[in-house]
Amino acid sequence: DFQMTQSPSTLSASVGDRVTITCRASQSIKSWVAWYQQKPGKAPTLLIYKASTLDSGVPSRFSGSGSGTEFTLTISSLQPDDSATYYCQRYNSYLVTFGGGTKVEIK
Amino acid sequence: EVQLVQSGAEVKKPGESLKISCKGSGYSFANHWIAWVRQKPGKGLEWMGIFHPGDSDARYSPSFQGLVTLSADKSISTAYLQWNSLEASDTAMYFCARQAVTGTLLAYYMDVWGKGTTVTVSS
């Protein structure tokens, strides 16, 4: 079965830190990856699609990279509003697969 | 404004049936697949499947095939998620979301999400 393995599951960082979240696919998926942010009690919101394209209105401190089997979401300078859980997602296939999520906490 | 408005929270008993809804507005509802995503308390996102309101095509995750039914009424721009017999393990938040890309038969990313419907199943 296809899997998206996300790491770490939790991270704690200070305001202003550079934060990186990784997602590994069990087989090559080119650049067919999206990233979402979800705050407690809210619906997810789309941050990035096609591995590196920022959705409209998403702050430029967010960036995505990667292709094939390894993908990263980077927050260049962590802000208090970035406290949330982040999910990667594989798409452009018969089925969609989400990663397990990374909870980002502010120290 | 493009939005999806989901029906309110439900409390049901095991074995009961349920149909929750997701009404789209601000865009051509018939052209975009609607995805459904489950989130159990404290857990991650699970993709359940997608439904195309324009041609009534449905695609299910193997984990949910046969357990739920997706449908839509394009005349009122509303998608539905239905259970015939609920179990306690169905207790979760359910999100509908618009698939961003049209004209594809494949599952894509979602750019607009409903706020979610909480379903609680308890005897």
Image: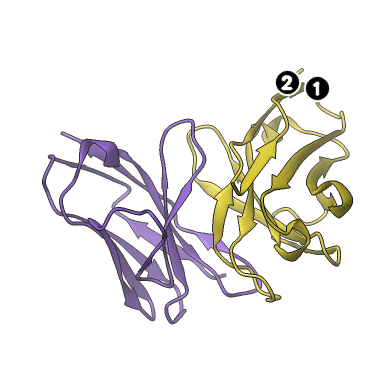
Chain colours: A purple, B yellow
Q: Position of residue A53 (x, y in %)?
A: 38, 69
- Above or below — where is B8 with respect to A63? above
Q: Position of residue A90 (x, y in %)?
A: 50, 67
Residue B107: image tag: none
Within 10 Å of disc 1 (Cα), the crowding (few <14, some 14-19, many 20+) is: some
Q: Position of residue A12 (x, y in %)?
A: 20, 40
Is residue B78 rendered to the left or right of residue A77?
A: right
- Above or below — where is B11 with respect to B112? above
Give the chain of mark 1: B
The residues bearing labels 1 and 2 have C-alpha atoms spaced at a distance of 5 Å
Is residue B80 rendered to the left or right of residue A82?
A: right
What residue sits right under mark 1 in the picture? B13
Q: Secondary structure at mark 1?
A: loop
* Residue sticking out furthest to the top: B123
Q: Position of residue B73 (x, y in %)?
A: 87, 50
Residue type at the position of mark 1: Lys
What residue sits right under mark 2 in the picture? B122
Give the chain of mark 2: B
